[in-house]
Amino acid sequence: MRILVFFAHPDDETMLAGGTLAFLAKLGAEVHYFSATRGEGGDLGEPALCTRAQVGELREEELVCAVRALGGSSLHFMDYIDPTVGAENELYAFEGDDVVFAEKIMDEIRAMQADVVISHGSDGEYGHPAHLKVHLGVKQALLNLPEAECPLFYTFQGAFSGHPKERVMNVTDPAHVILDIASVTAEKLAAIACHKTQHALFLRHVEPDEQGQRLLKLAVMPLESLHRVFPAVESLPVQDALTDLLAGVEGVTLLAELSIPAKS
């Protein structure tokens, strides 16, 4: 099975779906990674590990490291430029014509003969404009393809009761698959460790342990989830090539009913 993962910035793949992607690689799937940008506008590290001019190159190296840790088959960059975060922590989408962006995604799907595409959810997880741009680009790319050529389309962080980090949950997208990633925690933590420039950012959203320490291992969500966009889900549990691969695997739940909580 050939899986293409499209995301906006280095670290999205790890923090939003690293356990899932490592899980799929261990089951024998080819997982190919496509990052729209090199994260040029992101954090430099605390203390800074590079200059603003150098951060894109460094984050590219970090993503190479993370993809290797997750067992990925290949990594590709789409050469869009990530804008710098605004003065009030305002987030922006990268520039580029939406039609052309969707065409580039469609070309990659065709060239790689993808069986499955996985990308950002319809809420952009926490509303990040770049995540939303990638989601819409993938969706349009699939609409442009003849139905017979369309791969399955799943998105990260589907909504379910008991989600471990509601801040990144796509409320609009009910989870169809939930994965307990205990068996691949080491791989996800190794990938998190690769993204050194972003460690301080990751730790800002971590609750301290009993000793008051904020540790990277606490940034690992124990559960991850997927929502199927295409084909539209008509009945549960979802049955397709991806869920056939996951069926019966310890730690995987194919949901038989939906329970979509609101973000608190």
Image (tube, helix red, strand yellow):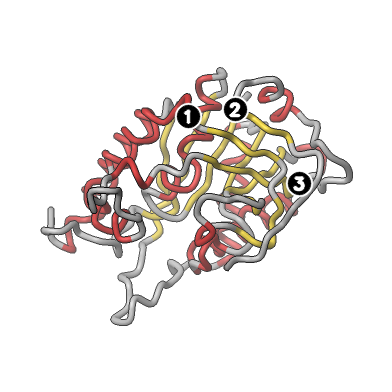
- Please name whichever residue, 21 or 100, is drawn nearer the observer in this view of the structure: 21
Q: Are marks 1 and 2 in contact (CB under 8 Å)?
A: yes
Q: Earlier in the sequence, mark 1 or mark 2?
A: 1
Q: Are marks 1 and 3 in contact (CB under 8 Å)?
A: no
Residue 33 vs residue 171: left or right? left
Residue occupied by mark 1: 182
Measured along the vertical axis of the image, is residue 72 above or below residue 63? above
Q: Earlier in the sequence, mark 1 or mark 3?
A: 1
Q: Residues within 10 Å of mark 2 (few under 14, many from 20)?
A: some
Residue occupied by mark 2: 251
Q: How many marks?
A: 3
- Please name whichever residue, 27 or 79, is drawn nearer the observer in this view of the structure: 27
* Amino acid type at image mark 3: Phe
Q: Looking at this rendering, what residue extends furthest in the right direction?
A: 234
- Please name whichever residue, 260 or 89, is drawn nearer the observer in this view of the structure: 260
Indicate the position of residue 28 as horizontal and vertical percent values.
55, 18
* Amino acid type at image mark 1: Ala
Quarter occupied by the C terminus: bottom right
Mark pair 1, 3: CA separation: 28 Å
Q: Which mark is residue 230?
A: 3
Q: Dot 1: what SS?
A: helix
Residue at (73%, 34%) from the top-left corner? 254
Q: Earlier in the sequence, mark 2 or mark 3?
A: 3
Mark pair 1, 2: CA separation: 8 Å
Measured along the vertical axis of the image, is residue 256 above or below residue 15? above
Residue 60 vs residue 157: left or right? left
* Amino acid type at image mark 2: Gly
Indicate the position of residue 204 as horizontal and vertical percent values.
30, 60
